[in-house]
Each structure stands twice: as C-alpha cells, then as structure tokens.
Image (cartoon, rainbow, N blue to C red):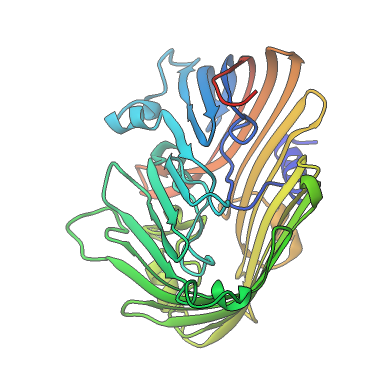
C-alpha cells in the first residue's frame, strides 16, 4: 500500500472513530494529559520535508500545574544533502518566538470564568462560530503565528477575545455578552438568557500595508437556555452577521450537552440552519482562512463576489468521549444545492486508551462534493497525525505526519507541504506541585 494511501485511510478511520473535547485543539501529545506534572521530551530521527531528507533533533518540554500549562517546541532540522540547518525554521527573529508552542490558563468554555492562551491557536472560536469557527493560525507551517485568546465570564456578562499574530497587526476579534435578567429573576430559563455582539476585522488580508483591503464583520446573537443542570444543557440560539460592504446572513440553531455521572461519558451536539444573502460566507474566519485570505487564485474577496444569490445551508457539530479515553470533535457544513461547498473539521485523540499507545489527529477538508472527497489528500486538505508507542516508561517511538502548505516564492502561490518525521524520543515526567 503506498504511504500516502495508508495515511488517507488511517487518518479518516482514526478521525471518525476517536475524539477530543470541544474547543480543546490539536496541540501536542501531552498538553491535555498532564495534571500537576511536567514532561521533557527530546528525540532524534529522520524526516522527509518536500521530498528532501532531514536529520531532526528536537526538545519539547511541557508543564501543567493547577490551571496553568505551557509547552515549547524547539526543532533543528539538518538537510542531509546540503549539510545545512533548514533555513525556513530560523531565518526570522519571529521564528524564535514560535518556539513557544503555547502558554495557557484554563480551558475554553469550561466552568472556570477565565481562559487565556498564548501561542498556536489551532481552533479559535467566538460565540456560536457564525463568524469565527475553528480558525487556525498555524496552517502554513513555515509562517505559523503566535496569537492570543482571552475570555472572562463574570456572571452577569463577559467577553471573548482573540488576535492571530502578536508579531504583526492582522486579525482582531471580540464578543461581549450580557445576561440582562440575571439579577431580576430566579427562573432558570430566563435567568441565563443572553444577548451578545461580535466584531472581527482583518486589517491586511493580502499582507501589504500599501493596499486598502480591510475586511470587517459585525454580528449580534441571542441565546436562551431551556435546560441548565450539572448533567445536561439545552439551548436555543440565533445569530445575525454582516460583512461590511458585502452581504449579511442569519442562523438559528440548538446546542445540546450531556455529561455522564462521574465523568463516564460526555456527548454534545450543535445543529444550525443558515439563511444567507448574496456575498456572505458563514464562519468567514475558519480553518483555511490563512490560506484563503490572500490566495491569488481564489481569495476570500473573490469568493464573496462569486456568491450572487441567496442561499441556505446547514452546519453541524458533534463531540464527546467515553470513559475519558476515546474523544471526538467533528463539524460539517454545506450550502443547499451548491456543488463542492462542503467543509469538514475533525479532531481526535486516544490519550491513554490502549496500553503504551497514544494518538492525536486533526483533519480539515474543503470543497467537498461527495463522500469520497473526504478521502482525498490534496490542496483542499490539511492534516496532522501523531502516534506514539511507549517502548519503556521513558523511551517512546513517535511518528508525526503533517500535510500543510508553504508559499512558493517563485510563483507566489501556496503549495502542499508534506512532512513525515519518525523519531525515537526520551520522555521524563515529574511533579510540579498541586494536589497529589
């Protein structure tokens, strides 16, 4: 079986049968596994990047204590043909900041009121996702960015914020929400009724300050929780959004979440119906935005002008876990009667389900028309698959496969970049405080 075919099958089978909790993005093999622990991993191996062999050395320390967590990703890749360090990894001062994989406090949408994250934003989302939904600032590997998210819920209201790039002003977004009946009634349904407003802007989609191509989107939303208990929640919601100088769209949906006793299982779902005017794209800032924002062949501006009539569509989200082992998050959206309008986003993990084995994966696909398109790894796909086997408690054989994009300087177009990196790694865990 050819290597590419193997990974197509492995990725799709894995992504459809495993899972990851809602809003916890693909980060590393350890980020969501550590509790009051630290781990230092380092390894050596041979990788293939754009068809060229590289000798790889890396160091990846990670810490988790209380609600805090952080991780670094320091890589040295030597081209075995030229004997030089891969220039794209360390040719800018910003590359040294990229060595910070993440620094976080809490988890998004958990009961804790505060969440913040610095570094890779693999699945940034605001509100119900009608404007920003699973945005990824590391899609183009050699141009991955260091972003920031900060959310705070103070009971009667709160806010969510994000920016994609601390090294250069680009995308800024925020949502504020208010529960106007929080202090006026004790009725559970009315008490948690919320209204929100969102504004997101990309001040420089094409990357050139001399052009005026800013895109801005504002929106409003309402949410009415019908059920809100420790075990189950059910909420109805509606969104309205407008792209400045273009069209507008509306959506109405239902959001459901069920938790098993003692954390035995978790399942959640979101189903949304969309009503869209001409020149409007829902979830404008999505998983492929970094590729589409300045694509000379089919950028976002061109996509907007191509939408000349009213359309309708459907969006669905499913996530959950069983015994906190097999975990899944998956989204799919499609416009009615519009060919190749399907978009898929899936994240999956087996943190410790099988003895000595751990796995994580993320897969995005666009321009889906038929089910078979999901199995095609091409310029419409982005993927990452990591698989680790613990030979000894401190010795791990780890394989990392990435299917991302790079900018071809000669043609100024984005091309697929595939990386396959098997490594033999040492991993040492140690306590860093907190309750034992």
Which x, y percent locates residue 322?
81, 47
Counting the numbered discs, the total is 0
Q: Nearer the viewer, residue 35 or 371?
A: 35
Residue 93 falls left or right of residue 127 = left
Q: Residue at x 49, y 87 (%)?
A: 309
197 or 293, nearer to the observer: 197
Question: Does residue 80 appear left or right of residue 167 in this picture?
Answer: right
Is residue 339 something one can see in this rendering?
no
- Which of the two residues, 416 or 263, is positioned nearer the viewer here? 263
Q: Quadrant of the C terminus?
A: top right
For the point 62% across and 73% down, which residue is it?
188
Pick the quarter of the image with the N terminus. top right
Instruction: Relative to 394, say whether 192 is above or below.
Output: below
Picture coordinates of residue 301, whole percent (x, y): 37, 69
Position of 89 relative to 402 (above/below): above
Q: Is residue 205 visible?
A: yes
Q: In the rendered view, would you say 181 is above or below 15?
A: below
The answer to whether 9 appears left or right of 300 in the picture is right
Residue positioned 81% across, 42% down in the render: 323
Pinpoint residue 206: horizontal percent, then vertical percent: 30, 57
x 34%, y 31%: residue: 97
Q: Hey, which residue is sitting farthest left in the picture? A: 210
Residue 424 position within the rendered picture, expressed as x and y whole percent measured from the top left = 65, 15
């Amino acid at each position: 079986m050819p290597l590419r075919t193997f990974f197509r099958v492995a990725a799709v089978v894995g992504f459809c049968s495993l899972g990851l909790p809602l809003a916890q993005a693909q980060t590393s093999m350890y980020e969501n596994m550590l509790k009051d622990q630290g781990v230092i991993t380092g390894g050596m191996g041979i990788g293939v990047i754009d068809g060229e062999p590289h000798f790889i050395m890396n160091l990846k320390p990670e810490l988790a204590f209380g609600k805090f967590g952080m991780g670094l990703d320091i890589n040295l890749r030597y081209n075995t043909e030229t004997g030089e360090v891969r220039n794209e990894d360390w040719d800018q001062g910003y590359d040294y900041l990229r060595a910070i994989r993440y620094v976080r406090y809490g988890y998004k949408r958990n009961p804790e009121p505060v969440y913040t994250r610095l570094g890779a934003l693999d699945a940034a989302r605001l509100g119900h996702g009608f404007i920003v939904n699973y945005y990824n600032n590391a899609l183009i590997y050699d141009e991955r960015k260091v972003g920031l998210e900060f959310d705070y819920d103070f009971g009667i209201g709160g806010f969510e914020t994000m920016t994609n790039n601390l090294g250069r002003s680009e995308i800024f977004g925020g949502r504020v929400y208010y529960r106007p009946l929080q202090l006026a009634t004790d009725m559970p349904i009315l008490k948690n009724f919320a209204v929100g407003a969102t504004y997101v802007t990309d001040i420089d989609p094409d990357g050139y300050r001399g052009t005026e191509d800013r895109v801005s989107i504002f929106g409003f939303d309402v949410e009415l929780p019908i059920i809100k208990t420790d075990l189950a929640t059910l909420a109805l919601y509606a969104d309205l959004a407008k792209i400045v100088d273009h069209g507008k769209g509306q959506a109405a949906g239902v959001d459901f979440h069920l938790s098993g006793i003692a954390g035995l299982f978790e399942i959640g779902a979101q189903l949304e119906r969309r009503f869209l005017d001409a020149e409007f794209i829902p979830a404008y800032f999505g998983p492929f935005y970094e590729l589409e924002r300045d694509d000379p062949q089919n950028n976002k501006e061109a996509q907007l002008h191509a939408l000349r009539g009213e359309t309708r569509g459907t969006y669905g989200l499913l996530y959950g876990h069983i015994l906190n082992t097999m975990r899944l998050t998956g989204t799919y959206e499609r416009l009615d009667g519009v060919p190749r309008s399907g978009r898929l986003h899936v994240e999956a993990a087996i943190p410790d389900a099988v003895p000595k084995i751990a796995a994580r994966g993320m897969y995005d696909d666009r321009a889906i028309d038929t089910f078979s398109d999901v199995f095609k790894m091409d310029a419409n796909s982005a993927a990452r698959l990591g698989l680790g086997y613990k030979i000894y408690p401190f010795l791990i054989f780890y394989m990392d496969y990435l299917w991302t994009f790079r900018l071809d300087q000669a043609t100024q177009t984005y091309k697929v970049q595939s990386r396959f990196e098997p490594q033999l790694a040492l991993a040492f865990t140690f306590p860093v405080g907190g309750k034992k």
